[in-house]
Amino acid sequence: MKIYVFEDQQALNFAPISSTRAVFDIRIGSETFLDRICSLFPNESISLIVRDELADLVSEVHENHEVNPEDYEDGLWISGSVIWSEKSIKSLFQEDTVFRSKNKLVAANLSLNHAKNWIAKGGPLQSDFKETESQEIQILSCEYLWDIINQIPETINYDATRLSPINPKDYEHINLLNPKNIYIDNASIMPGVLINAENGAVIIDSGVSIYGQTYIEGPAFIGANTIINPLTKIKKAIIGQKCKIGGELDSSIIQGYTNKVHDGHLGNSFLGEWVNLGAGTTNSNLKNNYSPVKVHINDVLVDSKSLHVGCFVGDHVKTAIGTLINTGSVIGAASMIASYGFIPKTLPPFSWYINKKHQRIDIDKFILTAEIVKKRRNKNFSRIEKELYKKIANS
């Protein structure tokens, strides 16, 4: 069966992380939304439906998948912002049926004619589909970044079911609580580290280095080749590959390739890639009056209906030492911050916010710096990436 993984009209609700990548490439655990879908359909051909402005980048990242195809087949259309499982996937094999969660279209099993009709009207990025029978299903559908953060226990514990726990005798030099729920793949862990898996699984990928006196409490995932500094506290967190982490990290997700090396609190937050937080950068994740946090998403003030919401930081953002970030803050990609006191709760992409004065970052200087930053991790800042950032800067 042909599988189509799609973004929909709410793709930018996941900004600033979705400003520079497809929604299905957002990290949800040890994998992304798309990784999870591919693992559920290992033998099927999967095509990707994305915003036009991201099509070239997604094609570059996913060479083995067709992006925005011109021809379609009978197939299963699957939302790229749902945390799918074997159980939820099994409910999707009723032909010519649309599947909804809380009245939102999350999947559709469509014949070729129905698929063509939908695409002719703009497809999932521009329209709903109401020409077939509709069925409500129970799934973990995410609408905003904080929804992904709230599902950390589910995603980590699901990931752990596909792994084999450690042999405690191999790790007698560190302190382990509930080792049957700890999963380590060829990592370097110094004496004095405490790993507590009593409240959820702890997964440590290959090439990770963890220095002494660090505390890790599950559910937690640490991605390949990440370095955890001494005296770090990690709890209910997801850290992507090749990060450098220090200080306190709680109920947060880091996409990957990001530095939070020094002391400072990061809570209930989502960071993109190539972010660098200066020493002492700290965010608030609880208002003093204990009221639900509201967040500006695409010029709309959204009530998160949650007391604990931190900050959402786009790719290539940099903060100076001592930066203070308020509850519900959104910092656009490629921004630079060096200011005293709390910064504004909303900063657009390419913000140059210095000493409470707001300017725009020069795109050519940004590209030069981004090339240097990515080269340090043996990555190239591709021509397609540069064109995308130029479009963002000019918009």
Image: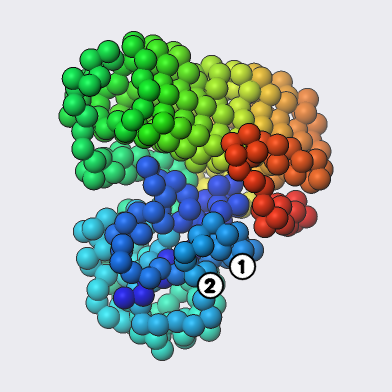
**Residue 226 located left or right of residue 44:** right
| Type of amino acid at the residue the image marks with label 1 | Asp
Q: CA distance from mark 2 to mark 1?
A: 8 Å
Q: Residues within 10 Å of mark 2 (few under 14, many from 20)?
A: some
**Label 2, on which residue?**
68
Q: Nearer the viewer, mark 2 or mark 1?
A: 2
Query: Would you say residue 179 is visible in this rendering?
Result: yes
User: Do residues under tags 2 and 1 come within 8 Å of each other at their CB atoms?
Assistant: yes
The relative height of residue 358 versus residue 19 in the rendered view (above or below) is above
Place of residue 65 in the rendered image (x, y in percent of width and height, measured from the top left) = 47, 66
Q: Earlier in the sequence, mark 2 or mark 1?
A: 1
**Label 1, on which residue?**
52
Q: Residues within 10 Å of mark 1 (few under 14, many from 20)?
A: few
The relative height of residue 74 versus residue 185 in the rendered view (above or below) is below
Position of the C terminus by quadrant: bottom right
Place of residue 219 in the rendered image (x, y in percent of width and height, measured from the top left) = 31, 32
Q: Residue at x 66, y 19 (%)?
A: 321
Observer-nearest residue: 135 or 228? 228
Place of residue 3 in the rendered image (x, y in percent of width and height, measured from the top left) = 37, 71
Q: Residue at x 54, y 56 (%)?
A: 61
Q: Residue at x 37, y 42 (%)?
A: 30
**Residue 394 located left or right of residue 265:** right
The relative height of residue 384 versus residue 199 in the rendered view (above or below) is below
Observer-nearest residue: 225 or 30? 225
